[in-house]
Image (cartoon, rainbow, N blue to C red):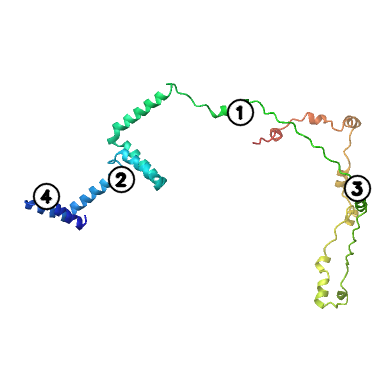
Amino acid sequence: MSPAMACVLAMILRELFPARNSFRTLASALCSSMFFSSLFLHIGTSLSSFLRLGFGVPIQTLVINKDLWGKQNGSKYRRRMRKRINKTWASIYNYYKLKERQKKRRQERLSKSDGKKKKPPPKVFKRTESLAMPKKEFLPETKGQKKKKIFSDYKHLEVMAAPVSRPEPKPKRVGVNPAALTCTPSEITMRLAQVPERWLRVPKPLMPGKVKRGALKYKITPKIEALAVPKPRSEKAKTEDDAGPWTISKSALKYKATPRIIELAKPIERD
């Protein structure tokens, strides 16, 4: 509490109770005490917040203020006033008024309706109604007659029929610069122009179809000569196998596969 307010309060108490000294001392004690000043401040702030929320203001006053000053102060003010009105309706002071208001609105709603709840038509009906309408008949398209162009410029036709004359490009001159022919190379240039000896020692690649001389002079051993001789076959086996090129031999049909081969013959399962 400020000093001015304390003085005003002391003067009021003195005027109300001029004959009693006890009230004068009480007024001065109340004004000078920090405890009571903080208490008054707390009561004042709580009262101001109470009034700011709209609990102590009639709803009619709040609604009138919202309608009068809502357009001038903007949407933020209207939103704040609407919030205060809702809080005031939800308070205990307007409990019975709220119940009467809800009852009155319910009766008005029932008096307007027939007593049966009508479902609004779904949006699909509008589309079905538009599709159910007869198809609009349009006028047939009028095909305009195109005028035939009469050709008369025969000179231009001769110009277009003549072959196009394209100039031949000049042949590109490929050769050595004359100044380079008369140039005398230096020692380092001559050394760099020679092929290194390591490239001369590399064996030349064989031509396709050419046999090495070492292979021509090679003498085969008796073992290799025996392996190179084809396997002797009987006349009966020749006639049976030569009957069809894709026939399976009898020994292959009698073969019994091992479990490992059966496992490998199965297809791989992939996800």
Quadrant holding the N terminus: bottom left
Mark 3 touching mark 1, by CB under 8 A?
no
State the residue position of label 3.
152
| First reached walking from the N terminus: tag 1 or tag 4 | 4
Q: Amino acid at mark 1?
A: Ser
Q: CA distance from mark 1 to mark 4?
A: 85 Å
| First reached walking from the N terminus: tag 3 or tag 2 | 2
Determine the residue located farthest toward the top in the rendered image: 115
Given this view, does label 3 or label 4 mark the residue nearer the observer? 3
Q: CA distance from mark 3 to mark 1?
A: 57 Å
State the residue position of label 4.
16
State the residue position of label 2.
52
The structure residue drawn at horizontal position 30% and vertical position 42%, both measured from the top left corner, is 54
Spot occupied by residue 257 in the image (x, y as percentages of width and height) = 73, 32
Q: Which mark is residue 130?
A: 1
Spot occupied by residue 167 in the image (x, y as percentages of width and height) = 90, 61
| Side (left or right) of 113 relative to 217 | left
Q: Amino acid at mark 4?
A: Leu
Q: Secondary structure at mark 2?
A: helix
The quadrant in which residue 241 appears is top right
The structure residue drawn at horizontal position 32% and vertical position 38%, both measured from the top left corner, is 60
